[in-house]
Amino acid sequence: MRWLSILAPRRVRLLSLVLLAAVSQAASAQGSGDDVLLQMKQAFQRGDKARLSALLPMARGHALEPWAAYWELKARLQEASPLEVQDFFARYPGTYQEDRLRNDWLLLLGKQRDWDNFNALHPSYRMGDDREVRCYAVLAGAQRNGITKEQAREVRRDWLAQRDADDGCLAAAERLIAADLMSPNDAWRKARLSMEANRATAARNAVNLVAPDDIQLFDQMNASPVKYLTGRVVVAAKPKKEIVVLALVKMAMSDPDAAALQLDSKWGPMLSVEERNWLWGLIGKQSAIKLSPTAGGYFANASRVKDLSDDMLTWKVRAALRMGQWKDVAPAIDAMSEDTQDDPTWVYWKARALAQRGGEERRAEARALYESIAGTRGFYELLALEELGQQASVPTRPAPLTPEEKAAARNNGSLQRALLAIGIGLRSEGVREWNYATNLHDRGGMGDRELLAAADLACQREVWDRCINTSERTKGVIDVEQRFPMPFHDTVIRKSNEIGLEPAYVYGLIRQESRFVMDARSGVGASGLMQVMPATARWTARKIGLGGFTPDQIYDHETNITIGTNYLKLALDDFGGSMPLAAAAYNAGPGRPRAWRNGPTIEAAIWAENVPFNETRDYVKKVLANTTNYAAIISGRPQSIKARLGTVGPRDDSIPEPNKDLP
């Protein structure tokens, strides 16, 4: 500083030491505060209320104080006074933590049926994504204004969508059924869906709403559906029939062929048309998931597709595609709900089915459907683009962000807290706060330019998952540098080229595996950029002659990329160069795709859509879409996703497997 030059040298040195000490003390205080936050998170996870209360004073003044205060109050919310809760709202207005606690408090008020306080608090609730709170809100409002048909439809949607048993939607459903605003059939539908999802408690609760006198029969059925179905069961009344349906649902989930035999030989004539159709749809779905050729025949036994759920219909389409039964594709898609039909997956396959049938009118309809989704945003968008005679190219980047737009993102308190939380190791908290800030900006969500600015902030801080996810939400523009970043560029390119692997494929896989988060760790123990399992890492290291490898090296980006790329190349070689099969092997292990490839030789897009695991199906499609986009960026030339997909069929036994022991 210039003014220091006028001071005596000794005073300058003394003042410099004082300044350095102050900076060091501030840094130490911040570091100590970070440690306090981390200790509080651990105490919160343990439910240690005393520890949280003792640590909270030390977190005061820290930028992440709202999290510390939230954990402390949330841990003892059952005993907290309304005054304490109101004080929290006043202390942290507009924050994620304020609305998170409001969500928690509304749930508590709903359970206590404290409708006056619920109604007073609910208008300021911004989060809005908790189904149980929404159901409580309908019940609370009914005390004053009754319940509208639209509210009844909303409760029905939320209740049917809830996987686990809950109080709010169950209570709302009970009220609506009693008021004839919902049908008892809705309760039976809920019971079926819950049994299908292996949620017996939720199913029992639904049955208890409409058939409390038969709840013991439900318990007997749930204990042993086979024993129940082979015993003496009278099905004259609807509840008795529905409990038989639930028994067949439970049987079908593990053994669809056995359920089909029971339905065909004994129970079918005793059930209603709707009940039979539902069961045939479920049996068909479970058979399709097993990739059984019997699936199509089971689906054909359902006389009305309108009786099938969207989930059943999607598997009906997949089974038809796998067996080349194109005539069954469009009718099944037309029977889906509007929201499901609008998914690019089913838009694309309906267009393909129409084009397959031929005729000028159908081809024109197919083209219109392709045009409605074509682009570079995803797997089916890229396929639709190619059906229109185009290939993936790099979209024009939007206008550069202005200094004001960047400053607005930089000065956003929620984004700042999110980045700080991620930086000190509170990733889940940081991600939640970031998502809240970008989703609920003035309740309308951020616009494209604000999203680009927020994504840019994350990119600059190298928080790549928030950079990508935020940029992906823009609707009118695409910034490819944000959506498809290339960290560790030199290492990825070099390691890929050394072993003859396409760098775009590696980037496409990393983007899906870890979003370039170096310390990413999955629930099953996969680690690092390329999410390598410890056993796989050791096997690959031995296979490629990487001496001195130790498990802790997997977090070193150079080692992780070395191990990951080599394993991917070994998988690719093992599956004859098929990118979809190798990607499936990387995600689910090689044994499963070896089994999944058996059957007819089909387009890889159809094969990928029939992958039985939801996660792996989504993974394969996203890796291939990512790869195509990265290839366009790296090469600067249009790229074909179809060329990377090819076909999938049984392995040629005359060709030896190069890596039989691939883990």
Image (tube, rainbow, N blue to C red):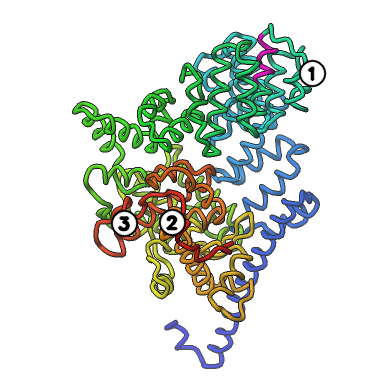
Tell me if residue 249 is in the magenta stretch.
Answer: no
Judged from this view, the residue extending furthest toward the front is 654
Tell me the magenta residue range: 238-245
Residue contact at pointers 3 and 1, CB within 8 angstroms: no
Amino acid on which disc 2 is placed: Cys
Residue 27, x across and y down, in percent: 60, 72
Residue 189, x across and y down, in percent: 60, 20
Closer to the N terminus: mark 3 or mark 2? 3
Residue contact at pointers 1 and 2, CB within 8 angstroms: no
Q: Is residue 368 left or right of residue 286?
A: left
> Mark 2: which secondary structure?
helix
Q: Which mark is residue 467?
A: 2
Tell me if I can see residue 195 in this picture. no
Residue 409, x across and y down, in percent: 42, 54
Q: Is residue 176 above or below residue 372?
A: above
Q: Which mark is residue 216?
A: 1
Amino acid on which disc 1 is placed: Gln
- Measured Cα–Cα span from mark 3 to mark 1: 65 Å
Would you call the spot at circle 2 few (<14 residues within 10 Å), some (14-19), or many (20 or more)?
many
Please tell me which residue lies in front, 590 or 366. Answer: 590
- Measured Cα–Cα span from mark 3 to mark 2: 15 Å
Amino acid on which disc 3 is placed: Leu
> Mark 3: which secondary structure?
loop
Nearer mark to the viewer, of 3 and 1? 1
Which residue sits at x=51%, y=31%?
A: 295
Name the residue beneath numbered marker 3.
401
- In terms of secondary structure, what is the magenta stretch mainly? helix
- Measured Cα–Cα span from mark 1 to mark 2: 53 Å
